[in-house]
Amino acid sequence: MPTINCNTTSFSLDSLKSACNQLNNHISFHIPGHKGNKQFNQFLKQAEQLDLTELPGLDDLYDPKSHIKDIEKNLSQIYGSNETIISTNGASSLIIASLIELGKSASHIIIPRNCHVSVINGLILTSLTPIWLELDYCDDFKTFTKINLKTLENLILKNINYNIGALLITQPSYAGYLNDVENIASLCAKYNLKLIVDEAHGAHLPFSHQSNYSGLKHKADIVIHSLHKTLSALSQAACLHLSERSGLNAIDLKQNLKLISTTSPSYLIMLSIEDSLKYINDDFISKKILLMEKFLSKLKLIDHIDIFNPATNQDIFHILIKDKNLAASDLMNILIDHNIYPEGIIGDGLLLMPGIGTSTKDVEFILNVLPKTFKYKNNFNKKRPKQNSHLNFDQVMSPSQAYTKPSRLVKTEDSLNLISAQTISKCPPGIPILVPGVKITSEIIESIDDLFVKVVDV
Ligand SMILES: Cc1ncc(COP(=O)(O)O)c(C=O)c1O
């Protein structure tokens, strides 16, 4: 095998492959939702032959007329939308495409503080200015919780003179918190705002006992699903649903999507979307939900494990836990030592993300390990890293203005009161701690320091 020599190290071109192979039989409590389960995406056995391009007869993602159109029509029918389009560039690209559309007619948009970084990328590419909505916060888990309806209405009224186009919410949140989307939709209707729901983590929601928490149920104007996070499609598979009352059309959104996406959309990803259609139904999903309910009920019996929001408005595929005796990073390391890989650390908690591919065996395995973690309490450093995602943003200019103006790098410690020209966010959860156009405060500097970021673009 050829090797590439770098200054300080050398590595084989096979290094990623061998790293992936080492994880071959691990227990996945992370994205993607298929969990490597062979039941799904069987076409991958012929991956080389099926990795194609827009050959005659294969249709065109950006101007679909036959097979791809059929996939979109099927998705639209299954999810009950007016129109649905698919993307092979993730929910991220569909969020950006939606913001480009909104930016054609509006100057402002209301965004809760827990949005995904792709929302900021969309703002940078439009002239939209965000109006930040503070969320309620769980001090125990250091994690955002709900959109307070009163706070939202006050914010709309305070900014009523702006041309606010929409409210864009994340549902469920990265931590799995489900908002009262029914009343949020009513509030949007009252003030004539479009409702865009980033339902990247909730593609299963409309087929669950929690369907009332899906934006689709309440005719949100745009609902965006990742089809790879909890469902079975390959990474980057996603779709966007338009409601009839949105007044938006798929052709315009496709144009926007084309502007920011690859010109070589992956047919493997499209095939995986077609394959996932077999499993997007009440029957299949409810079986998995039953398994998750059993998992949760057993988890609740473990004394030293706390569960975030153990209520009916917690998404069943997002389980955020805390060990009373261990930092989240220590708990994560213990699980990894047992070949169990969680999704990531959120605030003071550890996020487990089962999915449609999770098996009874996976659940039994983790339920066998978690009761034993109390043994480790004396071996670990109890100091928890600071998590300062709960920061107010003072947006003094639009993200696109701040991003496109000439800027310079300054040491993080010298950036107080300067205006950021960049986004800083850590994935997971991908929630920004700094956004272009925001004035840098001492709390933000503290947060940036926590990520060991030494310079900031201002
Ligand atoms: C809340 C949220 N929205 C959107 C996205 C983007 O999804 P995708 O990975 O499909 O681009 C993510 C990714 O983690 C996310 O957490």
Image (cartoon, rainbow, N blue to C red):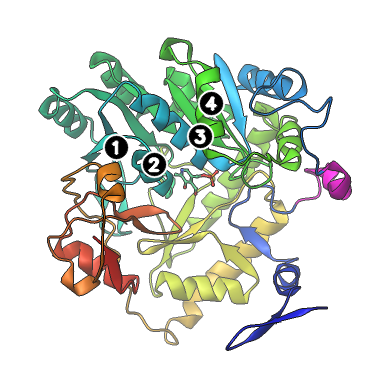
Disc 1 residue crowd, few under 14, some 14–19, many 20+, Cα 10 Å: many
Q: Which mark is residue 94?
A: 3
Which one is nearer the viewer's eye here, 321 or 185? 185
Please tell me whether the stretch drawn in magenta is mainly helix, strand or loop. helix
Furthest-front residue in this view: 406
Mark 3 or 4 closer to N-term?
3
Q: Earlier in the sequence, mark 2 or mark 4?
A: 2
Compare marks 1 and 2 and give the one earlier in the sequence. 1
Q: Secondary structure at mark 4?
A: helix
Numbered mark located on residue 315 in the image:
none
Q: Quadrant of residue 1?
A: bottom right
- Residue at x 48% of width, y 82% of height: 376
Residue 111 is marked as: 1
Callout 4, which amino acid? Gln
First-in-chain label (1 vs 3): 3
Q: In the rendering, at what x and y percent does residue 399 appear?
A: 28, 44
Inspect the magenta stretch and tell me whether residue 318 lies in it: no
Cα–Cα gap, marks 1 and 3: 16 Å
Instruction: Work out how far the residue at label 3 is from the one at label 4, CA to CA, in angstroms.
Output: 11 Å
- Where is mark 4, residue-wise? 255
The answer for how far apart the CA atoms under marks 4 and 1 are is 24 Å
Label 3 neighbourhood size at 10 Å, few (<14), some (14-19), many (20+)?
many
Using the rendered image of the protein, determine whether residue 114 is visible from the camera's viewpoint.
yes
Q: Secondary structure at mark 3?
A: helix
- Which amino acid type is marked by label 2? Val
Residue under numbered circle 2? 119
Q: Nearer the viewer, mark 1 or mark 2?
A: 2
From the viewer's perspective, is the residue at label 2 or at label 4 nearer? Answer: 4
Position of 51 relative to 67 (above/below): below
Above-or-below relation of 341 to 262: below
Whether label 2 touches label 4, CB < 8 Å? no
Magenta region, residue range: 37-50
